[in-house]
Image: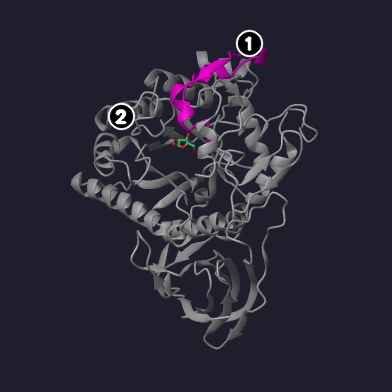
């Protein structure tokens, strides 16, 4: 096999930033089968006494997801939170205008909080700034976070939760820049509403943190000016600005598809620059960080969904079946996110179960892991500590959108104990292996503790039968200057090196 050389050089004195593990978050929306027949299916053989599917809980626990965004997404912009609490037999069936389905409200706020305990995650709760606003949001936070002795806190107690939920992280609406959004607004209208909503919510609980909507994608016509105006109007009442980004390989141009991590990199850098420009203009001491609270590959299900029958309950929607090249791009996006560990503090793989998700369920059978599950699981479990400035040398290739795409994407993370360096790397070359060096720099390498790969699959191969996974890469050897290892063509790779 033809080989070329590439490397990552470690510099222990040049940290990018400490990883906030909330970048390994995910998302459950009332959409399709994410909730019903996804995480919640009373009567399923694996369901517990609450109707929570244990097979799904087990897979989520393997993914190690610390924070989960809820209940939408587009859904939240028409959602009345009051519908989702209280006795289940009194909860209304509603039209969900966003996805044109029927919402039964049999799974709601209390069920979500209870379920979160089983998957060891914290909530990232979104409020409705589409059809509703300040009043509903201040009532909701009184319900969730106020201890007792008021109308909504006592309603929560009567509904079975004596202690407040103490939800810390709040999204101020969803994708309000998108014309598809119920209650879509221009930047000034949204900025004023988000600011006043956050202000009122903070009066109820000043320990919360809030996320304002940024752009729903880099290609939105309002990108840039939206961020600038919203930040200008909300600066003192928000902590994070959101970004959303999905990619697809509609043209079946895999080299260009795998290069989309460069687009994500430009998106994150651009939004960071705008945040800092507004900070400078305001002479502010406060830094706004980023929340990439929707990201993934999304396109496989588009055709199917265009012909969906309307007003069904829990229909099969957005059920992308992911292939191997999707897993490579997801790995590359994770590496890109780590490169921005200094400013990217939260992120949500969208979504978690059945809807553009790493985990799928059969309503009459089991649950299974998609191809993208594996790179995500490795990064979320092993990518902890401080990201080192990535000095990656690799040959490049050109595509219709990008002039110079490095074949190898890589990142190195030093753990908090200072005794282990973890390297994640993707080889995007479809036909050429890489003679890859992890150059020790100022580190004294002691041993290779882990050397694995996800490789050898066809680009369009999927994992319904569960044959995919992480396998050992037996080529790694320790030398004077570092670790030398072969990266297979089209591969996802993880290494852990013990350092003295
Ligand atoms: O994740 C699916 C949808 O994508 C979300 O509801 C919306 O916010 C985005 O457009």
Q: Is 94 contained in the magenta span?
A: yes
215 relative to 327, above or below: above
Tell me the tag on residue 60: none
Numbered marks: total: 2
Q: In this rendering, would 495 be left or right of 289?
A: right
Question: Residue beneath label 1, please?
Answer: 90
Tell me whether circle 1 and circle 2 mark residues in contact (CB < 8 Å): no
The spot of residue 269 in percent (x, y) is 33, 55
Q: Nearer the viewer, residue 458 or 149?
A: 458
Residue 375 placement: quadrant = bottom right
228 relative to 143, above or below: below
Q: Name the secondary structure under disc 2.
A: helix
424 relative to 105, above or below: below
Q: Is 250 contained in the magenta span?
A: no
The spot of residue 110 in percent (x, y) is 61, 25
Residue 209 placement: quadrant = top left
Which stretch did the figure color magenta? 69-98
Q: Nearer the viewer, residue 432 or 406?
A: 432
Q: Sequence order check: which comes first, mark 1 or mark 2?
A: 1
């Amino acid at each position: 096999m033809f080989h070329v050389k590439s490397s990552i050089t470690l510099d222990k004195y040049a940290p990018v930033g400490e990883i906030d593990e909330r970048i390994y978050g995910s998302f459950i929306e009332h959409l399709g089968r994410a909730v019903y027949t996804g995480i919640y299916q009373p009567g399923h053989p694996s369901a517990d006494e609450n109707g929570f599917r244990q097979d799904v809980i087990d897979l989520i626990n393997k993914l190690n997801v610390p924070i989960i965004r809820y209940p939408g997404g587009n859904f939240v912009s028409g959602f009345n939170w009051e519908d989702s609490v209280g006795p289940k037999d009194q909860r209304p069936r509603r039209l969900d205008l966003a996805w044109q389905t029927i919402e039964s409200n049999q799974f709601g706020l209390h069920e979500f909080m209870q379920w979160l305990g089983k998957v060891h995650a914290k909530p990232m709760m979104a409020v409705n700034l589409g059809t509703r606003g300040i009043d509903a949001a201040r009532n909701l936070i009184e319900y969730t976070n106020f201890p007792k002795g008021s109308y909504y806190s006592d309603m929560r107690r009567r509904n079975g939760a004596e202690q407040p939920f103490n939800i810390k992280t709040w999204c101020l609406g969803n994708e309000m820049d998108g014309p598809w959004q119920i209650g879509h607004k221009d930047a000034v209208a949204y900025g004023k509403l988000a600011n006043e909503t956050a202000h009122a919510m903070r009066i109820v609980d000043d320990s919360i943190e809030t996320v304002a909507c940024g752009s729903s994608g880099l290609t939105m016509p309002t990108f840039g000016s939206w961020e600038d105006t919203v930040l200008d109007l909300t600066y003192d009442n928000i902590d994070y600005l959101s970004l959303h980004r999905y990619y697809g390989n509609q043209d079946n141009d895999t080299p260009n598809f795998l290069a989309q991590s460069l687009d994500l990199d430009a998106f994150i850098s651009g939004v960071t620059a705008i945040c800092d420009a507004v900070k400078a203009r305001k002479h502010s001491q406060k830094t706004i960080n980023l929340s990439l609270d929707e990201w993934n590959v999304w396109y496989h299900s588009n055709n199917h969904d265009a012909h969906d029958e309307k007003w069904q309950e829990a229909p099969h929607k957005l059920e992308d079946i992911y292939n191997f090249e999707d897993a490579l791009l997801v790995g590359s996006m994770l590496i890109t996110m780590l490169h921005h560990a200094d400013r990217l503090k939260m992120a949500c793989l969208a979504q978690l179960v059945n809807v553009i998700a790493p985990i799928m369920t059969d309503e009459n059978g089991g649950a299974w892991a998609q191809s993208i599950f594996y790179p995500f699981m490795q990064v979320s479990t092993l990518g902890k500590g401080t990201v080192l400035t990535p000095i990656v040398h690799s040959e490049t290739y050109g595509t219709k959108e990008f002039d110079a795409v490095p074949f190898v994407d890589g990142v190195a993370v030093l753990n908090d104990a200072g005794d282990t360096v973890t390297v994640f790397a993707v080889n995007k070359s479809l036909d050429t292996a890489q003679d890859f060096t992890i150059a020790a720099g100022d580190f004294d390498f002691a041993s290779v503790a882990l050397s694995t790969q996800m490789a050898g699959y066809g680009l369009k191969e999927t994992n319904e039968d569960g044959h995919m996974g992480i396998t050992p890469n037996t080529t790694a050897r320790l030398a004077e200057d570092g670790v030398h290892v072969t990266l297979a063509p089209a591969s996802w790779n993880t290494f852990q090196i013990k350092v003295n």
